[in-house]
Image (cartoon, helix red, strand yellow):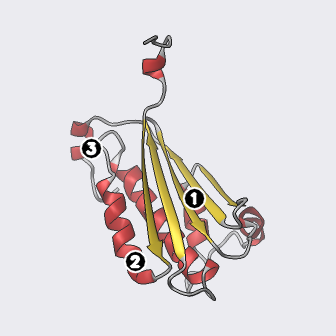
């Protein structure tokens, strides 16, 4: 077997997939599954931000994209963890939606008394890259990508929860 020069420097990754019904009751299952994927080199603060973004994304897919669809409608979730970034993808069957246009149309100040509408802004603030595109199989794919500087396990154990 031939070894490609510097192949040991290529990003290593781990991929996991989950499929759940379009039911807010599945949120605990989604978050438990996600927590099992946490690896020491990913800073705890970054992981918690991504967990929050995932919870918001799943909630939006359920409440908005699948609003008029049966709860049996499936949502596919994929997480890819690389050495210095991770990607979360969520596929839904809702109508196409221009995420970036929506963001540009929002007021810069958030009304804290409004019952909703902050989830997309929150995901946008957390992500280093975010997109929502229509796929060839007539689904939408939300991509949330987050870069990070890997920590040693010892550094992660000293995470200050008050940050």
Give the vertical position of 30 relative to 45 (above or below). below
Give the image location of residue 11, x and y in percent. 47, 30
Q: How far apart are marks 3 and 1 (CA)?
A: 23 Å
Going from the N terminus, do you reach mark 1 or mark 2 first?
2
Q: Residue 26 carries which label?
A: 2
The residue tagged 3 is 156
Please rate how many residues cluster around mark 1, counting C-alpha atoms within 10 Å: few if below 14, some from 14 to 19, many from 20. Answer: few
Location of residue 29 (image quadrant): bottom left
Which of marks 1 and 3 precedes in the sequence? 1
On the image, the x and y values in percent for residue 42 come to: 36, 43
Element assignment for label 3:
helix
Q: Mark 1 points at which residue?
A: 125
Q: In this view, does 35 lie above or below 42?
A: below
Q: What element carries label 2?
A: helix
Estimate the x, y position of residue 111 in percent, counting from the top left.
61, 81
Measured in 3D between alpha carbons, the distance from the residue under mark 3 to the one under mark 2, in whole angstroms, is 29 Å
Q: Which residue is drawn at 51% across and 65% down?
A: 76
Residue 3, image x, y percentages: 45, 12
Task: Single out the mark in the foreground, 3 or 2.
Answer: 2
* Residue farthest toward the front in the current orientation of the protein: 1
């Amino acid at each position: 077997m031939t070894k490609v020069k510097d192949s040991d420097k290529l990003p290593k990754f781990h991929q996991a997939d989950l499929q759940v019904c379009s039911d807010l009751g599945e949120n605990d299952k989604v978050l438990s599954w996600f927590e099992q994927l946490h690896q020491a080199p990913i800073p705890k603060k970054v992981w918690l931000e991504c967990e929050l973004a995932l919870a918001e994304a799943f909630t939006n897919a359920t409440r908005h994209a699948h609003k008029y669809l049966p709860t049996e409608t499936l949502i596919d979730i994929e997480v890819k963890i690389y050495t210095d970034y991770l990607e979360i993808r969520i596929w839904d069957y809702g109508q196409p939606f221009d995420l970036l246009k929506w963001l540009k149309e929002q007021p810069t100040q958030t009304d804290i008394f409004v019952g909703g509408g902050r989830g997309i802004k929150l995901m946008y603030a957390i992500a280093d890259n975010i997109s929502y595109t229509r796929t060839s199989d007539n689904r939408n794919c939300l991509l949330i990508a987050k870069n990070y500087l890997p920590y040693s396990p010892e550094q992660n154990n000293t995470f200050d929860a008050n940050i």
